[in-house]
Image (cartoon, grey):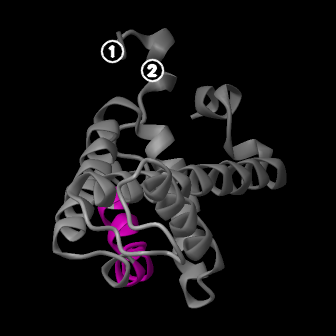
C-alpha cells in the first residue's frame, strides 16, 4: 500500500532515529535511579521479580517499535526528559512509592514503612507499576514536546508538508 503514490506520505522509513535504537538508549538511560532504589527495597526473591519486570517493560517497548513507530519515538522524546530528572529523582521516587504501595496492598511486600519486597511477584508487580508510570509520563512529555515543535514550525509537519516533498 505504501508503494501506491497516494499513500507515499505515510512512508516514514529512513527518516529520523530508528525506533529500536531510540527505545533501547532511552530505556537504559532511565534505569539507574529506579534500579538503585529497587535494589534497596527488595530481597533476593524480589530482585528476581524486578529483573523479570525490567525485561517485560523493555520487550513490550521493543515489540511496539515494529507496530507503533511514531508512538515509540514520542515516548523516546519524552523519555529523555524523564531521564534528565534523575538528577532530582522526585518523579522516579514517587513512581516507585506507588509501585511499592501496590505490592504492599496485594500482600507481596512486608507491611510497614516501605518494608522489603520479598516475593518474585511483588518485585514484578512493583516494577511493572513503576515502569508503567514512568513510560506514561514519558509519553505525555513526548506529546507535549512534539506538539510544541509542530506549533512553532508548522511548515515542517503534516500531510501538506509531506506532499510538497
Q: Which residues are magenta?
A: 22-37
Circles 1 and 2 in contact, beta carbons < 8 Å? yes
Please indicate, yes or no, whether residue 76 appears anywhere in the rendered image: no
Up/down of 160 relative to 48, above or below: above
Give the mark nearest the N terminus, 1 or 2: 1
Within 10 Å of the Cα at label 2, are there few (<14), some (14-19), or many (20+) other Cα atoms?
A: few
Above/below status of 159 relative to 31: above
- According to the image, label 1 marks what residue? 3
Asked if residue 26 is among those painted magenta in the image, a careful observer would answer yes
Which residue is depicted at the point 47% across and 66% down?
111
Indicate whether 139 appears above or below 70. below
Report the residue at 67% width, 34% height from top: 161
Return the mark for residue 8: 2
**Mark 2, secondary structure of its residue:** helix
Number of labels in the image equals: 2
User: Quarter of the image holding residue 3?
Assistant: top left
Name the image quarter holding the C terminus: top right
The residue sitting at 30% across, 61% down in the picture is 123
Q: Position of residue 110 (x, y in %)?
A: 39, 67
Q: CA distance from mark 1 to mark 2?
A: 6 Å
Amino acid at each position: 500500500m505504501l508503494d501506491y503514490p497516494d499513500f507515499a506520505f505515510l512512508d516514514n522509513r529512513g527518516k529520523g532515529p530508528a525506533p529500536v535504537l531510540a527505545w533501547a538508549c532511552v530505556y537504559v538511560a532511565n534505569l539507574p535511579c529506579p534500579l538503585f532504589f529497587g535494589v534497596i527495597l527488595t530481597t533476593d526473591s524480589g530482585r528476581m521479580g524486578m529483573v523479570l519486570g525490567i525485561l517485560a517493560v523493555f520487550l513490550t517497548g521493543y515489540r511496539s517499535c515494529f507496530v507503533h513507530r511514531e508512538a515509540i519515538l514520542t515516548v523516546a522524546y519524552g523519555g529523555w526528559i524523564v531521564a534528565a530528572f534523575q538528577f532530582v529523582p522526585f518523579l522516579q521516587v514517587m513512581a516507585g512509592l506507588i509501585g511499592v504501595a501496590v505490592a504492599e496492598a496485594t500482600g507481596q511486600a512486608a507491611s510497614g514503612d516501605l518494608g522489603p519486597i520479598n516475593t518474585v511477584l511483588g518485585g514484578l508487580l512493583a516494577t511493572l507499576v513503576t515502569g508503567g508510570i514512568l513510560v506514561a509520563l514519558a509519553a505525555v512529555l513526548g506529546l507535549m514536546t512534539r506538539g510544541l515543535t509542530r506549533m512553532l514550525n508548522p511548515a515542517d509537519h503534516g500531510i501538506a508538508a509531506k506532499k510538497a516533498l
